[in-house]
């Protein structure tokens, strides 16, 4: 699966009313960053849920790699293995 390999991190945009949270990748040497996603403010989602969603998105690459390891370690076809494989397939469904 191809995605931005650098470390994803949550950026709290305190001065932005429309996009208070962003997922960014810090450039080499900390000079530049690239935005992976902006989490817009939505009146239908409470602010604490918006922040939780942003943290979940920022953790996605780490969780993906952990699921890959779980799937490799539990290759017996059991429930844990099937759950990990299903989650990985869902993440790859856009390819």
Image (cartoon, rainbow, N blue to C red):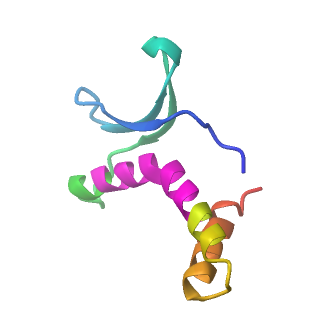
Main SS of residues in magenta: helix
Query: Residue shown at 28%/58% (left/top)?
Result: 49
Query: Residue shown at 32%/46% (left/top)?
Result: 41
Q: In this view, does 7 lie to the left or right of 94?
A: left
Q: In this view, does 40 lie above or below 53?
A: above
Q: Confirm whether the magenta stretch covers residue 39.
A: no
Query: Residue shown at 28%/55% (left/top)?
Result: 43
Q: Which of 76 and 81 is in front in this view?
A: 76
x and y percent of residue 87 in the render?
A: 59, 70
x and y percent of residue 68 in the render?
A: 62, 62
The quadrant holding residue 71 is bottom right
Query: Seen from this angle, which residue lies furthest right?
Result: 95
x and y percent of residue 25 in the render?
A: 49, 30
Q: Which of 66 and 15 is in front in this view?
A: 66
Q: Which of 16 and 9 is in front in this view?
A: 9
Q: Which of 76 and 93 is in front in this view?
A: 76
Q: Is residue 52 left or right of residue 39?
A: left
Q: In this view, does 57 lie above or below 85?
A: above
x and y percent of residue 65 in the render?
A: 57, 55
Q: In which quarter of the image is the C terminus?
A: bottom right
Residue 19 visible in the snapshot: no
Which range is magenta?
A: 51-67
Q: Is residue 38 left or right of residue 4?
A: left
Query: Seen from this angle, which residue lies furthest bottom?
Result: 78
Q: Confirm whether the magenta stretch covers residue 65.
A: yes
Query: Residue shown at 60%/37% (left/top)?
Result: 5
The quadrant holding residue 6 is top right
Q: Is residue 51 above or below residue 37?
A: below
């Amino acid at each position: 699966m191809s995605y931005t390999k650098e470390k994803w991190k949550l950026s709290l945009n305190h001065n932005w009313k429309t996009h208070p949270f962003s997922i960014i990748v810090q450039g080499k040497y900390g000079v530049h960053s690239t935005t992976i996603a902006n989490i817009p403010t939505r009146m239908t989602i409470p602010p604490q849920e918006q922040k939780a969603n942003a943290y979940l998105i920022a953790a996605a690459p780490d969780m993906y790699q952990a699921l890959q390891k779980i799937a490799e370690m539990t290759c017996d076809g059991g429930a844990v293995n099937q759950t990990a494989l299903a989650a990985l397939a869902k993440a790859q469904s856009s390819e």
